[in-house]
Image: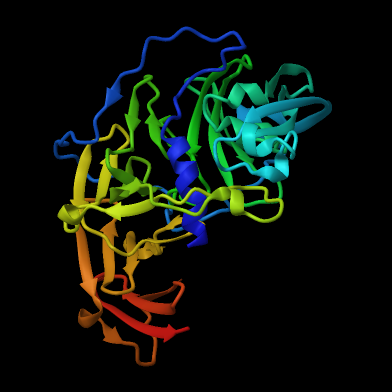
């Protein structure tokens, strides 16, 4: 239950996050963006062109970035990413329930004031042209992120270097992610930064409110210029598509192709439950844990919770999926087979859900009863792939000409 302890309080705080620009710096004036609904039926569309997107690839969701080079108008520019701390400038905030006595401004009064202390710091993003001349240098301070992350966590955090995720030429936008967390802890949050080529902050947005309940998602710059933050889609025309739903929790937002995504949810809500008096805690702790309980909605157990959508938020297909897991963040066990352009999503109790990348409305379910146990030899036209869960290790042998024909092995841990 430790994983749930971390996530509940962070998630509660995260629900209040808002999208905004850095108010301390000059900002470009834009018309208020329109918000699209996820519940708009999409007209029939032609097959999607082939691309190299593979939603089964995963990467570390936490950690600083590194210097890199990027192509702008066929010229190679240098991007320098730094993080800095000023230990001569202390900052104080009131704990929102997660940051504990280990960061107390005064341990003798912490129980009454809840005040925690950190130090000023931030990020420096520098862009150099091919000749090494400065294009811009943008400094971001901790206060810039109070609107998109919990103020107490921002205050005590050790600044991390931002991580560059892409450049969109038509809008001349540079997109980054930034991890913000408790030092020496895996409790953290993430946000997205969008800069113009003039160095101005165009947008700051939350990505996830808690590393412990984060959706299976990586912020991405998509081919059409849409930015996936893992809570919203920001369209190149300024419109926003929210991926959140009332009385539900986002489990995943996976980019299937250049033009489609898969979103998943669990239905219900968090409810508080009685807990022991926190004053009985012994010793100095760095984080306090609220423990609201997730209560599933019994009336929606068979309601579709997985949606294939376009980058404008239009639903192409929906189905029910039960196979997600959650430890530090949620995870959808899956693999992609390029030879048949098919995603295989595992539900270790039921079987596999097949998604055709180029025809997203063609989803199929293949149960374990429909599969054949693996017997040697492996056939030349079969694609072999493995998926592991906490309890089992699966090896599948999928016919690339008939993707629904699958043989498998299962080893229980």
- Looking at the picture, how far across and down is residue 211, in whole percent? 53, 48
- Answer with left or right where residue 390 lies relative to residue 68: left
Q: Quadrant of residue 40?
A: top left
Q: Residue at x 38, y 19 (%)?
A: 238
Residue 120, image quadrant: top right
Given the current orientation, which residue lies at the most extreme bottom position?
376
| 307 in relation to 353, above or below | above
Residue 240, percent across and down? 35, 26
Q: Position of residue 198 (x, y in %)?
A: 62, 14
Q: Would you say 304 lies left or right of 281 here? A: left
In the image, 163: left or right of 96? right
Tell me which residue sits at (33%, 40%) in the image: 259
293 over 147 or under it: above or below: below
Q: Residue at x 35, y 17 (%)?
A: 33
Q: Residue 402 or 256: which is nearer the viewer?
A: 256
Residue 406 is at least partly visible in this image: yes
């Amino acid at each position: 239950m430790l994983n749930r302890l971390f996530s509940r309080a962070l998630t509660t705080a995260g629900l209040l996050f808002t999208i905004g620009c850095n108010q301390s710096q000059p900002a470009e004036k834009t018309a208020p963006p329109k918000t699209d609904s996820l519940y708009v039926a999409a007209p029939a569309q032609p097959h999607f062109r082939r691309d190299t997107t593979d939603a089964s690839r995963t990467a570390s969701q936490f950690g600083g970035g590194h210097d890199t080079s990027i192509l702008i108008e066929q010229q190679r520019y240098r991007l320098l990413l730094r993080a800095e701390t000023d230990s001569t400038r202390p900052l104080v905030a009131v704990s929102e329930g997660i940051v504990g006595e280990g960061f107390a401004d005064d341990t003798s009064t912490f129980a009454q004031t809840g005040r925690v202390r950190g130090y000023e710091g931030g990020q420096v993003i520098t862009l150099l042209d091919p000749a090494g001349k400065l294009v811009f240098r943008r400094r971001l301070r901790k206060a810039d992120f109070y609107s998109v992350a919990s103020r107490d966590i921002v205050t005590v955090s050790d600044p991390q270097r931002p991580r560059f995720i892409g450049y969109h030429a038509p809008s001349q936008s540079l997109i980054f992610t930034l991890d913000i967390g408790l030092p020496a802890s895996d409790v953290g949050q993430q946000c997205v930064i969008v800069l113009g080529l003039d160095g101005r902050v165009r947008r700051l947005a939350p990505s996830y409110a808690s590393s412990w309940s984060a959706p299976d998602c990586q912020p991405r710059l998509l081919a059409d210029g849409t930015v996936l933050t893992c809570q919203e889609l920001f369209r190149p025309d300024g419109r926003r598509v929210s991926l959140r739903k009332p009385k539900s929790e986002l489990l995943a937002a996976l980019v299937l192709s250049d033009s489609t995504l898969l979103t998943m949810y669990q239905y219900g809500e968090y409810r508080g439950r009685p807990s022991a008096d926190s004053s009985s805690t012994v010793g100095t702790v760095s984080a306090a844990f609220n423990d609201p309980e997730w209560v599933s909605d019994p009336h929606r157990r068979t309601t579709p919770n997985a949606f294939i959508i376009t980058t404008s938020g239009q639903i192409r297909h929906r189905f029910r999926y039960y196979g997600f897991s959650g430890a530090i963040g949620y995870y959808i066990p899956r693999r992609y087979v390029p030879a048949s352009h098919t995603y295989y999503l595992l539900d270790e109790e039921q079987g596999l859900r097949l998604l055709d990348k180029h025809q997203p409305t063609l989803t199929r379910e293949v149960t374990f009863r429909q599969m054949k146990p693996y017997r040697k030899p492996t056939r030349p036209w079969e694609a072999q792939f493995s998926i592991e869960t906490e309890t089992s290790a699966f090896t599948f042998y999928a016919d690339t000409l008939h993707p629904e024909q699958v043989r498998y092995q299962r080893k229980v841990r």
